[in-house]
Image: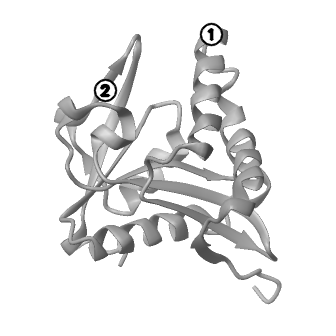
Amino acid sequence: MADAKEIHIREANEGDREAIRRVLEDAYGQYREVLPPEGWDQYKENIIASVDSNKPIARIIALIDDEVVGSSQLFQSSEAAYGAPELEIESPILRLLAVSPSARGKGIATALIKENVRRAAELGAATLHLHTSDMMESAVKLYERLGFERAYDKDIQKGELLVKSYRLHIQTAAIL
């Protein structure tokens, strides 16, 4: 792989916001056909609004040749991540992991997840959580391959959609 491009991971800054919006729209756009129109509109609106939210404790981006090709957000708790204190997740939550469709298959998602795990460990957390759904089949496979396990007690039911909870035990995580 002599022509493989190096992935750089760093904290996002104010100047990255528009690039992050583009990555999120491109990455999550594939679900437009899966969700009902009103569901898609609300989902997209929430995703785009997240770029300007002050709730994440970290916004992490992946770059190849100085182009933002991936992003993720890290939250302190379920209250900060979802406005859902009743989930009682008081450890970091990874949200809105996105990789540009044109940059997939290069290890970008894994690199972003690894950085989120590292940061959660730095915070002294025992676990890192995330939520996903069956429509994100390739993401689910990646999470499971990296050692995330189902956390059924932290699932979220949104109408007909089951948003499944996964957790990674940081101390035993092979990803680090």
Q: Residues within 10 Å of mark 1 (few under 14, many from 20)?
A: few
| Residue drawn where x is 34% and y is 32% of the image | 83
40 is higher (above) or lower (below) than 87: above
138 is higher (above) or lower (below) than 107: above
**Quarter of the image where one finds residue 24:** top right
Left of 59 or right of it: where is 86? left
Left of 156 or right of it: where is 71? right
Give the camera-side residue of 162 and 2.
162
Question: Does the CB distance between marks 1 and 2 fall below 8 Å?
Answer: no
**Quarter of the image where one finds residue 150:** top left
Location of residue 13 in the rendering, given as x and y in whole percent from the top left corner? 65, 65
Earlier residue among tags 1 and 2: 1
| Residue drawn where x is 61% and y is 45% of the image | 51
| Residue drawn where x is 44% and y is 45% of the image | 140
Q: Report the colour scheme.
A: one colour
Location of residue 21 in the rendering, given as x and y in whole percent from the top left corner? 72, 45
Left of 72 or right of it: where is 170? left
User: Which label sits on residue 90?
Assistant: none
Distance from label 1 to label 2 (Cα)? 19 Å
Q: Quadrant of the N terminus?
A: bottom right
**Quarter of the image where one finds residue 33:** top right
Q: Quadrant of the C terminus?
A: bottom left
User: Which label sits on residue 38?
Assistant: 1
Left of 88 or right of it: where is 155? right
Amino acid type at image mark 2: Ile
Location of residue 80 in the rendering, given as x and y in whole percent from the top left corner? 34, 42
Amino acid type at image mark 1: Glu
Helix, strand or loop status at disc 2: strand
Helix, strand or loop status at disc 1: helix
Residue position for label 2: 156
Q: Residues within 10 Å of mark 2 (few under 14, many from 20)?
A: some
Give the camera-side residue of 150 and 86.
86
